[in-house]
Image (cartoon, rainbow, N blue to C red):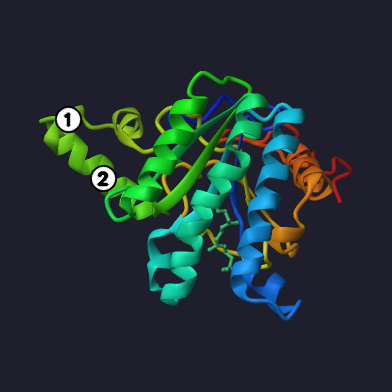
Amino acid sequence: MDSPRAPAASSAAVPRHVAIVMDGNGRWAKRRFMPRFFGHKQGVDALVRTVQACADRGVEYLTVFAFSSENWKRPSEEVSGLMGLVLVAVSKYLTKLSKEGVRIRIVGDREAVSDRVRDAWHTAESQTAHNTRITLSVAFNYGGRWDVVQACRRAVAEGLAPAEIDEARLSSLMALSYAPDPDLFIRTGGEVRISNFLLWQVAYAELYFSDCLWPDFDAAELDQALAAYARRDRRFGLVKTAEPQPATSGA
Ligand code: FPP
């Protein structure tokens, strides 16, 4: 059965929604004999480049995995470095992104982050709320399983009866309820897994994996991913449209 949120089978060349696991910052820095934090810092620049490139190509939603529920297990100096980077990134890029029409949304569990980080996110969201060119969703302290659990908790809290819970209802309670499901899922850094990102929402996404380390990601890398996407035959569970015909020679 098709998901109610899956768009109708289409050959639209440009995905409406791109989701990215920005992997490879640590290795990028290590190759330069630099601390991992340097890779994350360059990763912010790659992210800003990518938002711009996506907007220029007509992508309406970009969702990136900036800090997973599991990233708390990293060394404490790396975790605090990433938290500090939120403050730096917001003060350095918020005005620019807002001027370019980027609406910023944060998805994830905000309970565990500091007041300063929460305030920075609040500022980023409120200052860009009116923008319409592209929506950048930053998944921060996010996990796909966390998202399913929080949606179920909200369903219970709203007093929904079991019969009232279906895919559409649960989708409306998920963190990305304001966005269509991702059409294209990109992971950089050479690993070939989803790593608990948007588990519910990627049901029908086209998956694209690249060896490029995230700080090197640029418009040309994005174009390669978009070209691969444009070649895919999206069927959403429907039958193939151009099935190769069996030979009729009787052989
Ligand atoms: C994975 O690379 C990347 C992260 C855990 C962090 C991603 C964050 C950014 C790109 C910065 C964006 C930040 C903000 C504040 C918006 P890795 O460290 O696992 O790399 P490795 O696999 O080479 O070790």
Task: Tell me which image quadrant ligand 1 sits in.
Answer: bottom right
- Expressed as whole percent of the image width and height from the top left, the position of residue 218 reads 78, 49
Reply above or below: 181 against 187.
above
- Which quadrant is the N terminus positioned in? top left
Residue 113, visible in the rendered structure: yes
Amino acid identity at mark 1 = Ala
Closest to the observer: 202 or 32? 32
Amino acid identity at mark 2 = Gln
- Expressed as whole percent of the image width and height from the top left, the position of residue 40 reads 61, 62
Question: Which mark's residue is nearer the viewer, 1 or 2?
Answer: 2
Reply above or below: 243 against 126.
below
Q: Which residue is mark 1?
A: 163
> Which of the numbered marks, if any, corresponds to residue 150?
2
Residue drawn at (52%, 33%) of the image = 104
Quadrant in the rendering for residue 152: top left
Category of crowding for the residue at label 2, using alpha-carbon neighbours closer than 10 angstroms: few (below 14), some (14–19), many (at least 20): some
The residue sitting at the right extreme is 249
Residue 168 relative to residue 199: left or right: left
Question: Whole-Å distance between the Cαs marked 1 and 2?
Answer: 19 Å
Q: Secondary structure at mark 1?
A: helix
- Expressed as whole percent of the image width and height from the top left, the position of residue 192 reads 61, 65
